[in-house]
Image: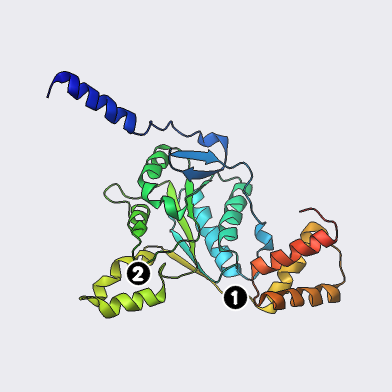
Amino acid sequence: MTGDALIRIAEALERLSPAATSAPDFASADAFAWHVLPDRLDPVRNVAKVDIGLLIGINRSRDTLLENTRHFARGLPANNALLWGARGMGKSSLVKAVHAAILAEGLPLKIVELSREDLPSVSRLLAHLRKASHRFILFCDDLSFSHDDQHYKSLKAVLDGGIEGRPDNVILYATSNRRHLMPRDMIENERSTAISPSEAVEEKVSLSDRFGLWLGFHPCSQDDYLAMITGYCTAHGVNINNDILRAEAIEWQATRGARSGRVAWQFFTDLAARHGVRL
Protein backbone atom coordinates (compact mmCIF):
# COMPACT_ATOMS: atom_id res chain seq x y z
CA MET A 1 0.00 0.00 0.00
CA THR A 2 1.40 3.38 -1.01
CA GLY A 3 2.00 6.29 1.33
CA ASP A 4 -0.72 8.33 -0.42
CA ALA A 5 -3.25 5.54 0.20
CA LEU A 6 -2.37 5.41 3.90
CA ILE A 7 -2.80 9.16 4.17
CA ARG A 8 -6.23 8.99 2.53
CA ILE A 9 -7.30 6.21 4.92
CA ALA A 10 -6.08 8.18 7.92
CA GLU A 11 -7.94 11.29 6.73
CA ALA A 12 -11.13 9.26 6.19
CA LEU A 13 -10.92 7.78 9.69
CA GLU A 14 -10.40 11.23 11.16
CA ARG A 15 -13.56 12.47 9.43
CA LEU A 16 -15.53 9.53 10.82
CA SER A 17 -14.30 9.90 14.39
CA PRO A 18 -16.30 12.18 16.72
CA ALA A 19 -14.91 15.59 17.42
CA ALA A 20 -13.14 16.01 20.73
CA THR A 21 -15.46 17.30 23.41
CA SER A 22 -14.32 20.46 25.13
CA ALA A 23 -14.10 20.52 28.92
CA PRO A 24 -17.49 21.39 30.45
CA ASP A 25 -17.91 24.67 32.29
CA PHE A 26 -19.08 23.27 35.61
CA ALA A 27 -19.09 26.74 37.16
CA SER A 28 -21.99 27.72 34.89
CA ALA A 29 -24.69 25.78 36.78
CA ASP A 30 -25.40 23.39 39.65
CA ALA A 31 -27.25 20.87 37.47
CA PHE A 32 -26.43 19.29 34.12
CA ALA A 33 -27.95 16.79 31.68
CA TRP A 34 -25.66 14.39 29.83
CA HIS A 35 -26.34 13.86 26.12
CA VAL A 36 -24.54 11.94 23.41
CA LEU A 37 -24.08 12.35 19.63
CA PRO A 38 -22.21 14.51 20.28
CA ASP A 39 -21.15 14.08 23.90
CA ARG A 40 -22.03 17.13 25.93
CA LEU A 41 -23.10 18.28 29.38
CA ASP A 42 -25.91 20.80 29.01
CA PRO A 43 -26.45 23.12 32.00
CA VAL A 44 -29.92 23.07 33.55
CA ARG A 45 -30.66 26.53 34.94
CA ASN A 46 -34.05 25.76 36.52
CA VAL A 47 -34.43 22.29 38.00
CA ALA A 48 -38.02 21.04 38.30
CA LYS A 49 -38.10 20.33 42.02
CA VAL A 50 -40.34 20.23 45.08
CA ASP A 51 -39.32 21.75 48.41
CA ILE A 52 -38.09 18.96 50.67
CA GLY A 53 -40.52 20.03 53.39
CA LEU A 54 -43.46 19.19 51.10
CA LEU A 55 -42.46 15.54 50.71
CA ILE A 56 -44.82 13.79 53.12
CA GLY A 57 -44.81 10.17 54.29
CA ILE A 58 -41.22 9.37 53.35
CA ASN A 59 -39.48 10.78 56.41
CA ARG A 60 -37.06 7.90 56.97
CA SER A 61 -35.92 7.79 53.34
CA ARG A 62 -35.70 11.59 53.26
CA ASP A 63 -33.54 11.81 56.39
CA THR A 64 -31.30 8.91 55.34
CA LEU A 65 -30.63 10.26 51.85
CA LEU A 66 -30.14 13.80 53.13
CA GLU A 67 -27.53 12.69 55.67
CA ASN A 68 -25.73 10.49 53.14
CA THR A 69 -25.61 13.38 50.65
CA ARG A 70 -24.42 15.79 53.30
CA HIS A 71 -21.54 13.43 54.14
CA PHE A 72 -20.61 13.19 50.46
CA ALA A 73 -20.73 16.96 49.92
CA ARG A 74 -18.37 17.38 52.88
CA GLY A 75 -15.88 14.92 51.42
CA LEU A 76 -16.75 12.13 53.86
CA PRO A 77 -17.49 8.49 52.93
CA ALA A 78 -20.97 7.96 51.44
CA ASN A 79 -22.93 5.22 49.69
CA ASN A 80 -24.51 4.92 46.27
CA ALA A 81 -28.30 4.81 46.75
CA LEU A 82 -31.11 2.91 45.05
CA LEU A 83 -34.56 4.43 45.63
CA TRP A 84 -37.07 1.74 44.71
CA GLY A 85 -40.77 1.08 45.10
CA ALA A 86 -44.23 2.38 44.31
CA ARG A 87 -44.77 4.69 41.35
CA GLY A 88 -45.46 8.34 42.05
CA MET A 89 -44.22 8.31 45.65
CA GLY A 90 -41.51 10.93 45.18
CA LYS A 91 -38.34 8.95 44.44
CA SER A 92 -36.95 11.30 41.79
CA SER A 93 -38.46 14.31 43.57
CA LEU A 94 -36.53 13.38 46.71
CA VAL A 95 -33.19 13.21 44.86
CA LYS A 96 -33.70 16.70 43.40
CA ALA A 97 -35.05 18.08 46.70
CA VAL A 98 -32.06 16.72 48.64
CA HIS A 99 -29.66 18.31 46.15
CA ALA A 100 -31.43 21.66 46.57
CA ALA A 101 -31.39 21.31 50.37
CA ILE A 102 -27.63 20.67 50.38
CA LEU A 103 -27.05 23.76 48.23
CA ALA A 104 -29.21 25.76 50.65
CA GLU A 105 -26.90 24.66 53.46
CA GLY A 106 -24.02 26.28 51.59
CA LEU A 107 -22.34 23.02 50.56
CA PRO A 108 -21.13 22.94 46.92
CA LEU A 109 -22.59 20.00 45.00
CA LYS A 110 -23.47 19.36 41.36
CA ILE A 111 -26.05 16.95 39.97
CA VAL A 112 -25.78 15.30 36.54
CA GLU A 113 -28.74 13.43 35.05
CA LEU A 114 -27.91 10.39 32.94
CA SER A 115 -30.68 8.61 31.02
CA ARG A 116 -30.83 4.82 31.00
CA GLU A 117 -30.44 4.79 27.21
CA ASP A 118 -27.11 6.61 27.50
CA LEU A 119 -25.56 4.20 30.03
CA PRO A 120 -23.12 2.79 27.43
CA SER A 121 -21.47 6.23 27.32
CA VAL A 122 -21.00 6.43 31.10
CA SER A 123 -17.24 5.82 30.96
CA ARG A 124 -16.83 8.93 28.81
CA LEU A 125 -18.97 10.93 31.23
CA LEU A 126 -16.96 9.70 34.22
CA ALA A 127 -13.78 10.80 32.47
CA HIS A 128 -15.12 14.38 32.46
CA LEU A 129 -16.29 14.24 36.07
CA ARG A 130 -13.09 12.63 37.33
CA LYS A 131 -11.03 15.59 36.10
CA ALA A 132 -13.24 18.20 37.76
CA SER A 133 -12.67 19.75 41.17
CA HIS A 134 -16.40 19.58 42.01
CA ARG A 135 -18.41 16.79 43.65
CA PHE A 136 -21.26 15.22 41.67
CA ILE A 137 -24.45 13.26 42.20
CA LEU A 138 -24.87 11.11 39.09
CA PHE A 139 -28.65 10.66 38.83
CA CYS A 140 -30.27 7.91 36.76
CA ASP A 141 -34.07 7.97 36.89
CA ASP A 142 -36.46 5.06 36.26
CA LEU A 143 -33.75 2.44 35.98
CA SER A 144 -34.64 -1.14 35.02
CA PHE A 145 -33.43 -3.90 32.70
CA SER A 146 -35.07 -6.55 30.54
CA HIS A 147 -33.73 -10.04 29.84
CA ASP A 148 -31.79 -9.04 26.70
CA ASP A 149 -30.61 -5.68 28.00
CA GLN A 150 -26.84 -5.28 28.27
CA HIS A 151 -26.91 -1.72 29.63
CA TYR A 152 -26.48 -3.06 33.17
CA LYS A 153 -22.85 -3.85 32.36
CA SER A 154 -22.22 -0.15 31.80
CA LEU A 155 -23.79 0.65 35.16
CA LYS A 156 -21.15 -1.49 36.84
CA ALA A 157 -18.58 1.03 35.65
CA VAL A 158 -20.20 3.54 37.99
CA LEU A 159 -20.74 1.15 40.89
CA ASP A 160 -17.43 -0.71 40.71
CA GLY A 161 -15.31 1.55 38.56
CA GLY A 162 -13.10 -1.17 37.08
CA ILE A 163 -9.36 -0.83 37.61
CA GLU A 164 -9.53 2.91 38.27
CA GLY A 165 -12.42 2.62 40.71
CA ARG A 166 -15.36 4.97 40.93
CA PRO A 167 -14.18 8.58 41.02
CA ASP A 168 -14.03 9.86 44.59
CA ASN A 169 -15.99 12.93 43.55
CA VAL A 170 -18.95 10.98 42.08
CA ILE A 171 -21.84 9.20 43.78
CA LEU A 172 -24.71 7.41 42.04
CA TYR A 173 -28.38 7.83 42.95
CA ALA A 174 -30.83 5.74 40.91
CA THR A 175 -34.59 5.27 41.07
CA SER A 176 -36.51 2.20 40.02
CA ASN A 177 -39.90 0.57 40.49
CA ARG A 178 -38.04 -2.73 40.98
CA ARG A 179 -35.83 -3.57 43.93
CA HIS A 180 -33.64 -5.87 41.82
CA LEU A 181 -33.84 -3.68 38.68
CA MET A 182 -35.37 -6.55 36.67
CA PRO A 183 -38.84 -8.15 36.50
CA ARG A 184 -39.57 -10.94 38.99
CA ASP A 185 -40.93 -13.24 36.26
CA MET A 186 -37.67 -12.81 34.36
CA ILE A 187 -35.69 -13.85 37.43
CA GLU A 188 -37.84 -16.94 37.93
CA ASN A 189 -37.74 -17.84 34.23
CA GLU A 190 -33.96 -17.65 33.99
CA ARG A 191 -33.55 -19.66 37.18
CA SER A 192 -35.83 -22.42 35.89
CA THR A 193 -34.33 -22.71 32.39
CA ALA A 194 -30.63 -22.10 32.93
CA ILE A 195 -28.04 -24.87 33.14
CA SER A 196 -26.64 -23.16 36.21
CA PRO A 197 -29.68 -21.41 37.72
CA SER A 198 -27.79 -19.68 40.51
CA GLU A 199 -25.32 -18.13 38.07
CA ALA A 200 -27.89 -17.20 35.40
CA VAL A 201 -29.27 -14.22 37.26
CA GLU A 202 -26.47 -13.59 39.75
CA GLU A 203 -24.82 -10.96 37.57
CA LYS A 204 -27.97 -8.88 37.17
CA VAL A 205 -29.54 -9.43 40.60
CA SER A 206 -26.26 -8.65 42.33
CA LEU A 207 -26.24 -5.27 40.60
CA SER A 208 -28.69 -3.89 43.14
CA ASP A 209 -26.54 -5.30 45.94
CA ARG A 210 -23.80 -2.92 44.87
CA PHE A 211 -25.87 0.03 46.13
CA GLY A 212 -24.96 0.71 49.75
CA LEU A 213 -28.37 2.25 50.47
CA TRP A 214 -31.73 0.70 49.55
CA LEU A 215 -34.54 3.12 50.26
CA GLY A 216 -38.04 1.68 49.85
CA PHE A 217 -41.10 3.72 48.83
CA HIS A 218 -44.55 2.27 49.47
CA PRO A 219 -48.12 3.34 48.64
CA CYS A 220 -49.24 6.14 50.94
CA SER A 221 -52.12 6.12 53.41
CA GLN A 222 -55.13 8.36 52.97
CA ASP A 223 -53.92 10.56 55.84
CA ASP A 224 -50.56 11.08 54.12
CA TYR A 225 -52.30 11.75 50.80
CA LEU A 226 -54.47 14.45 52.38
CA ALA A 227 -51.48 15.88 54.28
CA MET A 228 -49.59 16.28 50.99
CA ILE A 229 -52.45 18.26 49.49
CA THR A 230 -52.85 20.41 52.60
CA GLY A 231 -49.11 21.15 52.47
CA TYR A 232 -49.36 22.25 48.83
CA CYS A 233 -52.33 24.49 49.66
CA THR A 234 -50.42 26.16 52.49
CA ALA A 235 -47.25 26.60 50.44
CA HIS A 236 -49.08 28.14 47.46
CA GLY A 237 -51.71 30.16 49.32
CA VAL A 238 -54.82 28.23 48.25
CA ASN A 239 -57.59 28.85 50.77
CA ILE A 240 -60.41 26.30 50.84
CA ASN A 241 -62.73 24.82 53.45
CA ASN A 242 -61.17 21.67 54.94
CA ASP A 243 -64.30 19.55 54.53
CA ILE A 244 -64.64 20.53 50.88
CA LEU A 245 -60.94 19.94 50.27
CA ARG A 246 -61.12 16.49 51.85
CA ALA A 247 -64.21 15.46 49.88
CA GLU A 248 -62.80 16.65 46.54
CA ALA A 249 -59.41 15.05 47.18
CA ILE A 250 -60.94 11.69 48.06
CA GLU A 251 -63.19 11.81 45.02
CA TRP A 252 -60.18 12.60 42.82
CA GLN A 253 -58.16 9.64 44.10
CA ALA A 254 -61.18 7.36 43.70
CA THR A 255 -61.42 8.25 40.01
CA ARG A 256 -57.69 7.49 39.61
CA GLY A 257 -57.91 4.22 41.53
CA ALA A 258 -54.73 5.02 43.46
CA ARG A 259 -53.16 7.24 46.08
CA SER A 260 -49.65 8.62 45.68
CA GLY A 261 -47.67 11.81 45.82
CA ARG A 262 -48.11 12.19 42.07
CA VAL A 263 -51.90 11.87 42.32
CA ALA A 264 -51.89 14.41 45.17
CA TRP A 265 -49.96 16.90 43.02
CA GLN A 266 -52.24 16.31 40.03
CA PHE A 267 -55.28 17.04 42.19
CA PHE A 268 -53.66 20.16 43.61
CA THR A 269 -52.74 21.38 40.10
CA ASP A 270 -56.42 21.16 39.16
CA LEU A 271 -57.47 22.80 42.42
CA ALA A 272 -54.99 25.68 42.01
CA ALA A 273 -56.22 26.34 38.47
CA ARG A 274 -59.85 26.50 39.67
CA HIS A 275 -58.81 29.04 42.32
CA GLY A 276 -56.79 31.14 39.86
CA VAL A 277 -53.47 30.41 41.54
CA ARG A 278 -50.37 30.23 39.35
CA LEU A 279 -47.77 27.62 40.29
Say which mark, if any, is on residue 56.
none
Q: Earlier in the sequence, mark 2 or mark 1?
A: 2
In the image, 16 versus 199, the foreground residue is 16
Residue 139 located left or right of residue 274: left
Q: Residue under circle 2? A: 205
Question: Where is the N terminus found, in terms of image quarters?
Answer: top left
Relative image position of residue 234 (x, y in whole percent)? 79, 62
The quadrant of the image that shows the C terminus is: bottom right
Q: Nearer the viewer, residue 137 or 60?
A: 137
Marks 2 and 1, how far apart at CA: 24 Å
Where does residue 145 sit, x and y in percent of width and height? 40, 64
- Decide if residue 267 is on the left or right side of residue 146: right
Identify whether 44 is placed above or below 21: below
Quadrant of the image occupied by residue 233: bottom right
Disc 2 marks which amino acid?
Val
How many discs mark residues in the rendered view?
Answer: 2
* Residue for point 13% across, 21% down: 2
Q: Which residue is mark 1?
A: 219
